[in-house]
Image (cartoon, rainbow, N blue to C red):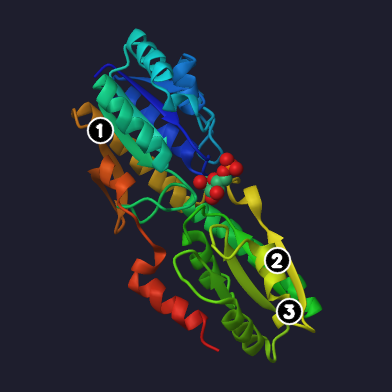
Amino acid sequence: MKKIGFLTSGGDSPGMNACIRAIVKSSLNSKIKPIAIYDGYKGMIENHFKEMKYDDVNNIIQLGGTIIGTARSEEFKIIDYRKKAIQNLQNANIEGLIVIGGDGTFTGATILSKEMNIPIIGVPATIDNDIYGTDNSIGFDTALNTVVEAIDKIRDTASSHHRIFFIEVMGRNSGFIALHAAIAGGAESVLIPEITGNLEHLAKEIKNKNKGKRSTIVIVAEGEEKGGAFEIMKKLKPFLVGYDLRSSVLGHIQRGGKPSALDRIISTKMGAKAVDLLSNNKTDLMVCYKNQQISTIPIIDGISKKISPMENEDMFLLEKMLTLE
Ligand code: F6P
């Protein structure tokens, strides 16, 4: 293999740059030319490619976001645009592809690998951590730490005012960030899409826990079916008369910022492994970080198999503890 292309796609996540750096350095060390494809599949369609050198990845390991940009490309779902993308890859003599992103990114990759017959390796990167087969996706650890820091800060003001706070966190349809943040942040309750429950019961739980306390924190996953933090707060108001309620949506601050040491290490290992796999003629695999080891699974499993934070027995027990009065 003489030339490989790589892209970041979907929501950016802290650690993507560390992965880009590892891909560029590992490729150059193996005499492979690394070609950055800017802005995900959009750049593939628009022929926005650049051959990367060592200098391009100096001093980027500590940066959040992605230096090569990302996008959620609607056009790539249309065959005619994909034909254009394929033509661009062929014109550039790109012989293998590394795609860094979440399930949308991997879905695009599997379609492309069928239509073009190009070897493709996926690297899981999303703060949501909702990808099967890996304990961590790139960015989850950093986002989790950002959320926990925010909870600590909100706790200060909540305690000063004797308030109950509903804090909404990201995660799309998954409760990974919410559950982990609730445990690490010492929250009194958590609402995630993977656990069903009713609001009246929640109100009782909140009242019980609030006894003798200066503050109560309820973490709400954005994918929670009963609504976001503001809506849950509104629905609970009639059951919590006399309590001072507030809501806060953490939003995109959860996606930015310096990657944690763990995210930098995982990203670096995954990037290097992806290059190694391509140069050994492997294809349609996703790189995983499982039990502190790098491994692989078929990329199709990463997309099609579902995971829940409650499948982990320790997390299941901790969630039960959290909801004890
Ligand atoms: O997938 C990452 C994520 O941050 C989700 O948690 C969130 O639902 C979504 O992306 C937001 O996407 P956008 O930045 O396109 O609004």
User: From the image, which quarter does the C terminus lie in?
Assistant: bottom right
* Picture quadrant where residue 26 is located: top left
The span from disc 3 to disc 1 (Cα, nearest Å) is: 59 Å
Observer able to see residue 38: yes
Give the residue pinned by disc 2. 153
Q: x, y (%) of residue 22? A: 39, 34
User: From the image, which quarter does the N terminus lie in?
Assistant: top left
> Foreground residue, 55 or 311?
311
Q: x, y (%) of residue 187? A: 59, 74
- Give the label, 3 or 2, closer to the camera: 3
Q: x, y (%) of residue 111? A: 32, 29
> Foreground residue, 215 or 235?
235
Give the residue pinned by disc 1. 276
Give the residue pinned by disc 3. 238
* Picture quadrant where residue 191 is located: bottom right
Extreme-top residue of the structure: 91
User: Hey, what amino acid is under mark 3?
Assistant: Pro
Residue 100 tag number: none
Question: In what element is the residue under mark 3?
Answer: helix
**Disc with the residue nearer the chain's start (3 vs 2):** 2
**Disc with the residue nearer the chain's start (1 vs 2):** 2
